[in-house]
Amino acid sequence: MQRNKQRRTQDRTEVSCCLKYLLFSFNVFFWLVGLGILAIGVWAWYEKQMFQNIGDLTEIFLDPGLLFIIVGCIIFIIGFAGCIGALRENTCLLMFFIACLVVILLTQVTVAVLIFVYKDFVNDRIRDTVNTYISRYRDDDDLQNIIDWTQDTWLYCCGVESPDDWNKNVYFNCSSPSRERCGVPFSCCKREDTDIVNLQCGYDVRTPENRDRQSQFIYTTGCLDAVAQWANNNMIPVAGTAVGIAVVEIIGICFAHQLRQDIFAQKAKWRRRR
């Protein structure tokens, strides 16, 4: 009886099943999220026939579909490594998972510090990037939808700093032969109490005779100022989300590290028995 009890004590595994399957479930969720983001990016590229016209992609980081594909691939690979590493008790995959999370966490902290220290420089880079988006507004359907959603649904703004930023787009430029010259996209317009969207409401609002009446028809606040105002109004939720993401990453790192230690302890026990 004593011998059987001693044998059961020796056979007890060092690997916690609770920790193992908790880490596995944790990574299954992110694996599925990455797969979903990747699918959205692939679908967007398929709809734009980018797989047949890859040479048309001149500015890689300005294509929303490609950004979805890249982010989706990264999350998918990390989540997959964490899933298989936990399920198969593979220390190499767990180490890869830990290293990826550490790099991501350090990158987030570094970016946050740089944004705080070099606020003016970051604002200039953001301004230049968004101005580039404006100039390509009609060239990419995904980019157009993102800009329209930002101006019409999220921030209620127009342009980067003012509606005049739309002069950088060849279609809305006041010297353009287009009917949209000296205008703005419909997403800059103030909505009336109707479900009908007037796609021509932004026509001619930047002409000299209509300039003094702009505020009656369109949003005159630039999106850069609108983002700053939104961040100030939602500082607690934004900070809470950022801290929550960091905490989840730290928990993932700790769980994976502890699981690796348990696996090594179990291997050491096996070696002692030989």
Image: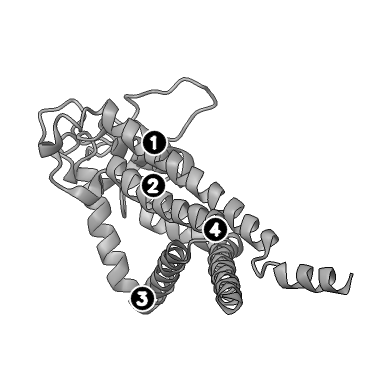
Disc 2: which residue:
72
Query: SS at mark 2?
Result: helix
Q: Residue 255, how many percent across, how many down? A: 59, 67
Local packing at callout 3 (Cα closer than 10 Å; few below 14, some 14-19, many 20+) is few
Disc 1: which residue:
39
Instruction: Give the number of the mark in front: 3 or 2.
Output: 2
Q: Amino acid at mark 1?
A: Ala
Q: Quadrant of residue 101?
A: bottom left
Viewer can see residue 185: no
Q: Tell me how far mark 4 sits from mark 2, CA to CA.
A: 21 Å
Instruction: Give the number of the mark in front: 4 or 2.
Output: 4
Disc 4: which residue:
86
Disc 3: which residue:
114
Query: SS at mark 4?
Result: helix
Q: Amino acid at mark 3?
A: Leu
Instruction: Give the number of the mark in front: 4 or 1.
Output: 4
Q: Earlier in the sequence, mark 3 or mark 2?
A: 2
The residue lying at 41 percent from left, 65 percent from top is 96
**Residue nearest the viewer, comparing 111 with 41:** 41
Total numbered labels: 4
**Residue nearest the viewer, comparing 113 with 82:** 82
Query: SS at mark 3?
Result: helix
Is mark 2 in CB contact (under 8 Å) with mark 1?
yes
The residue lying at 17 percent from left, 34 percent from top is 171
Q: Earlier in the sequence, mark 3 or mark 1?
A: 1
Q: Residue furthest top?
A: 196
Residue 269 appears left or right of 179? right
Q: Tell me how far mark 3 sits from mark 4, CA to CA.
A: 35 Å
The residue lying at 31 percent from left, 55 percent from top is 161
Instruction: Give the number of the mark in front: 3 or 1.
Output: 1
Q: Tell me how far mark 3 sits from mark 1, CA to CA.
A: 32 Å
Q: Amino acid at mark 2?
A: Gly
